[in-house]
Every structure is written in structure tokens, then in C-alpha cells.
Image (tube, rainbow, N blue to C red):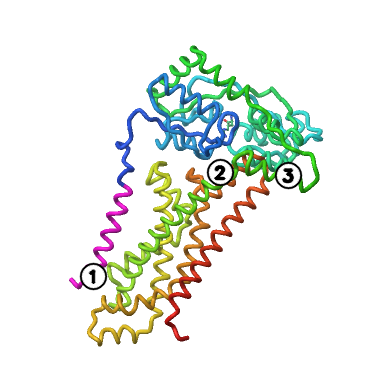
Amino acid sequence: MKKSTKRVLAMCLTCLVLLGGMFFPVTKSAQATDVITVGTYAEFPPFEYIGDDGEPDGFDIAVIEAIGEVEGFEVEIINMEFKSLIASLSTGSLDAVIAGMTVTDERKQSVDFSDSYYTATQYIVVAKDSDITSLADLNGKKIAVQEGTTGDLLCTPGEDNDVITDENTEVMRFKKGTDAVVSLNNGGVDAVVIDKNPAENFVANNSDKLKLIKDDTSTEEYAIAVAKGDTELLDKINSGLAKIKEDGTFDKLVAEYIEGAEDVETETSGNVIQQFINNLKYVFIDTNGYQLMAKGLGVTIGISFCAGILGIALGFVLALMKLTETRKKRKTVWSRIAGAYIDIIRGTPAMVQLLIMFMVIFRSQYAYIAAILSFGINSGAYVAENIRAGILAVDVGQMEGGRSLGFTYGETMRYIILPQAIKNVIPALGNEMITLVKETSIVGYVAIVDLTKAGDFIVSRTYQAFLPLIAVAIVYYIIVKIMTRILAAIERRLRQSDNR
Ligand code: ARG
């Protein structure tokens, strides 16, 4: 075997081992048996929301932890979209779900429910001056709901809906209840239909703009869900629930989380500038928005950096693999592998790759590793083509010159071609790294709180969209600006010896 081939092989092997090492901890056995993973969707105050530390908090979280305490298991909370919760129970990536989830016949087909722990009903939130007074008044109006919830069912005209019968009723489905409220605040919809306690919470936080219409016609029961047939866990949960009701813990939590929820005062006095400054203070300082953003920024930079390094390493190897084809003037095993890799990765959306990596391969664990791997692998495909183009752009005469001086192919590559290729590659590589930073903004989908997700949380907590989102955009812009500067400096440095 030639020396150069050996080197490529060694590099591939190292990469494989590295990747393998990262995959290894996925095996469940690494986890203690008495930890149960509990899914929730922390956008439902006071039952679940994101606390000041960026972690899920709320009544439901406290209840399941209390149950765990009396039953002797530990709880790991996983925050994911409401719609995915039931599916994740069925696939086994969650052991239980506590999410203010109503027991419905339809859901009972897929999961088993514990005893009920709370009785709720759907309330209507409207603007202060609205003339809507009941559910029936919503006919023909524009209603915002949280997607896939009982409020959604209640408002969607259909066969067994005898309240909302007007087919022209427009239902806007938001992932988060808070987004529905933001849209009501902005005048985009006429009403929000959502469970009683979140409705009260939303109105309390926007008491200058919104009012509550209590329609007690539709009561529903909240319960904890487990996978169908998991009677062992269900029994534990029911027995734990009974115990904490018995010993007063449950009532204490109700008092603390549900009855004790206080109103937030928003300043409305002063002139426009004063109001703006107050608002700025409210969004970023009083509600700890800046802390969330700073944390998120760290995550964005961390993931981008690691994925970037991985992408460049993979890209380099893939480029060399693909170049074997140019050299041999026919397809090789290496070039076929690299070609297929690039083809598949470029042919599928990064978002889907991320979801496959996290949910299928990593089974909803090790989100950070899954994200870094996914983005690194994705970036590698693009970097590979950049590097290959950069190498091919070096004049053939350079290779011929090197070889006629007695260098091997590998040596010529290393000492003559690559140093020149780097200059060609830097601008495209920089482009790719900039894209990567912005692309990581989708990691929120796998429950990672990056810069974008942090902005999203601030929107949820403050019911304001403008300031948090603009702030997030500005921070991304600054990161990219800094990267552009650094790249320009590197390029200038590399071109110092050029006489063009
Ligand atoms: N109770 C309603 C339902 O089961 C809404 C629950 C929403 N929960 C949440 N954590 N966002 O459909």
C-alpha cells in the first residue's frame, strides 16, 4: 500500500473511532434503573414553564418529583413539543408524561392514564373591549388555540362539535399557548381558547389589555400518562399520587404553584421613551432575559464551534477520498463512499437530519452530542466540496512540477498543492461556517436552549415579540460580523506572499 493511501486510511479510521466513541454512551445500561424520563411541554403556566435558570419548573414538575420521592425513583424532565409527547411514550423514548394533559378517549387508545390530579375547563381570553361573552359567540370568528390540545378540538368545527358549527370559523393553531396570546395582543385573532389556569395566568400578566371569559361548560381531567401496558410504572405513580395527597404535600404544591401565582405589574406611565426604557428593563433585566440570552449565546457558539471543527475534519477526509477519482481517472471505492455521503447529506434537510439523529439514533438523549454530530456531518458534505474545488483550482502544472522533482503524490499534495489550495478554500469555508452558525438556530427542536430558543422563551415569559426577537437577530448579526472580520484577516495574512 502507498504511504498516502495509508494516511487516508488512518485518518478515516480515527474518525470512525471518534464517532463510535461518541455513540457508545447511548446504550441505556449506562443509566441507573431508577431514573424515569418524564416528558412535558413547558409552555403552560402554572403547570409547566421555563424557570429563571432555563430549566422546566411548575406544578406538574413538582408533583412528579414528589411522587418520585415517595416511590423511590428519580425524575429526568424532558421538554418537548406537546404534539410529540404521546408518540414518544409509544416509541419508548419517554417513560411518562405530565403536561396538564387531559384524559380523552382518543388518547386512551395510545397511552394509559393515571388517576386524575386536577380538574380544569376551557376559558376564553379576549381583548378588553371585545363583545364576545361565550363559546357560542366564537362562531365565525378568528380563534387562536394551542395545536393538538382539547381547546383545539373544542373550537374546530366538525362532526361532533355542537358549539362551533360555523364552517367559516378560522382556527389558528400555535405550538405554544403564549404565542396565541401574543397574537391576540397584536390584534391578529379575536380570542384565545385555552385551559383555565394558563388562561388566568395569561390575563394576569396582561391585565391592561386582556380579559377572561369563564365558560364552565366543558370540564376535563388532567392525568399522568404512561406507555400502554406499563402497569408497573402506572401503579407506582397512582400509589405515589395517593400518598402525596394523603400527607398534604399535594395541597401544599397547589397552594404554592396554582393559588399563589401573583400578578406581574407592567409599568404603563411616563412618556414614550420612558416606557420603552421600562419595557427594555422588564424584558431583559426584571425577567432575567439577559441571562437566558447569555446562556443561549454560549450554547450557540459551543455547538457551532464543535460542529465546525468536525465538519472541516470530515470535509477534508471526504475531499481526499473523492479526489482519488480524479487521480485514477475512474471511480474508486473511496470516491463512491464519499460521493454517496455528500449526495445523501446534501439531498436532505438539516432539520430532518437533526431529528433523525436525536430521536432515532440517540433516542432522545444526549441532545448536545446529537446536535454537534448532526451539524458536523451536515457541514462536512459542503466543506468536502469546497475543499475539493480548492484543490482542483490549483494548476495541474504544480502537481507535475512536484512529481518531476521527485516528490511522491502525497508529498506534492502536502507541500505544494494544499498550501495553495487553502487560499482558494478560505472564502468558501468561511461562508460555510457562517451558514453553520445560523443553521444551529433549529436546535430548539431537540430541546436545546440556544440563542434562538432563548429569545423564544423570553417571548413566552413577557408576551412581547418585538424586543426579544430583534435582540436575538442583532446578536447573530454581531457574531457573523466578527467572523467576517476574522476571515478577512486570515485571508489577508495568507495572501501576503501573493503578487497579484
Ligand atoms: N389540557 C389540554 C390538553 O390536554 C392542554 C394541555 C397543554 N399542555 C401543555 N403542557 N402545553 O390538550
Q: Furthest residue to the left? A: 1
- The residue indicated by pointer 1 is 5
Q: Are marks 2 and 3 in contact (CB under 8 Å)?
A: no
* Label 3 close to label 1 by CB (< 8 Å): no
Query: Mark 2 or 1 closer to N-term?
Result: 1
Q: Position of residue 220 (x, y in %)?
A: 60, 23
Helix, strand or loop at label 1? It is helix
Main SS of the magenta part reads helix
Name the foreground residue: 371 vs 451: 451
Task: Give the mark, 2 or 3, whose residue is nearer the N terminus.
Answer: 3
- Of circles 2 and 3, the one toward us is 2
Task: Give the residue at x 66% y 46%.
Answer: 465
The quarter holding residue 251 reads top right
Q: Position of residue 277 (x, y in %)?
A: 72, 46
Query: In this rendering, would 217 be left or right of 430?
Result: right
Q: Which residue is mark 3?
A: 186
Considering the image in quadrants, where does the N terminus appear?
Answer: bottom left
Dot 1: within a 10 Å radius of its alpha carbon, few (fewer than 14), some, or many (20 or more) residues? some
Residue 54 lies, with reference to residue 315, above or below; the image says: above
Say which quarter of the image contains residue 382. bottom left
Residue pictured at 66% horizontal, 24% vertical: 218
Residue denoted by label 2:
291
In terms of secondary structure, where does tag 3 sit?
loop
The local crowd at label 3, few if under 14, some if 14 to 19, many if 20 or more residues have their Cα within 10 Å, is: few
